[in-house]
Amino acid sequence: MNDTKSLVLDIAMNLNRVGNWAADGFVEKKERIVTFLENNSSYLKELEKKTLPDKFKKTYSTFISEYKVLEKEGFSQPKDSMDWAEKMMTWGNILTHRANLIQ
């Protein structure tokens, strides 16, 4: 598996983790959630240096624009933790499936 695909899958896994933790209780799990959001920030910086395949770029661009808002909410506290959790898990699932486009 190439490095770019691994990074995308790591991000996706973290999105699913934080989504699950937030659904279980954002306030109680906030410290862990923030740690994984910080991990994703470093993964995203690494990913910026990579060349993404054209068929993945649109998904990634949409993800980045939505993730910036979700990340900001995650560092403070979402107004609706369950909605936030669902969005994180949805993006985790989307990126997991779309990572197959990366050779």
Image (cartoon, helix red, strand yellow):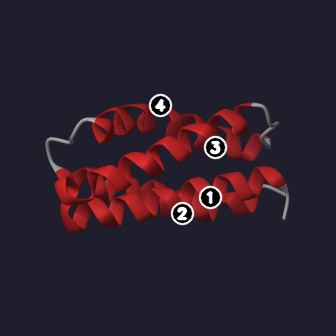
Sort mark 3 into few (<14), some (14-19) or many (20+) by Cα contacts within 10 Å: some
Please name the residue shown 19% across and 59% down the image.
Answer: 28
Disc number for residue 88: none
Mark 3 or mark 2: whose residue is earlier in sequence: 2
| Element type at mark 4 | helix
Q: Measure the alpha-carbon separation of dots 3 and 2.
A: 12 Å
Residue flagged by tag 2: what amino acid is it?
Met
Callout 2 environment at 10 Å: few (<14), some (14 to 19), or many (20+)?
Answer: many
Q: Secondary structure at mark 2?
A: helix
Whole-angstrom CA distance, mark 1 to mark 3, is 8 Å
Q: Residue at x 29, y 57 (%)?
A: 85
Question: Which residue does the image show at 34% across and 32% down from the upper left?
Answer: 72
Q: Are marks 3 and 2 in contact (CB under 8 Å)?
A: no
Measure the alpha-carbon separation of dots 1 and 2: 5 Å
Seen in the picture, residue 85 relative to 39 is either above or below; the reply is: below
Give yes or no for contact between labels 1 and 3 (Cβ–Cβ under 8 Å). yes
Quadrant location of the C terminus in the rendered image: bottom right
Q: Is residue 82 visible?
A: no
N-terminal-most mark, 2 or 4 = 2
- The image quarter in which residue 61 lies: top right
The residue that disc 1 covers is 10
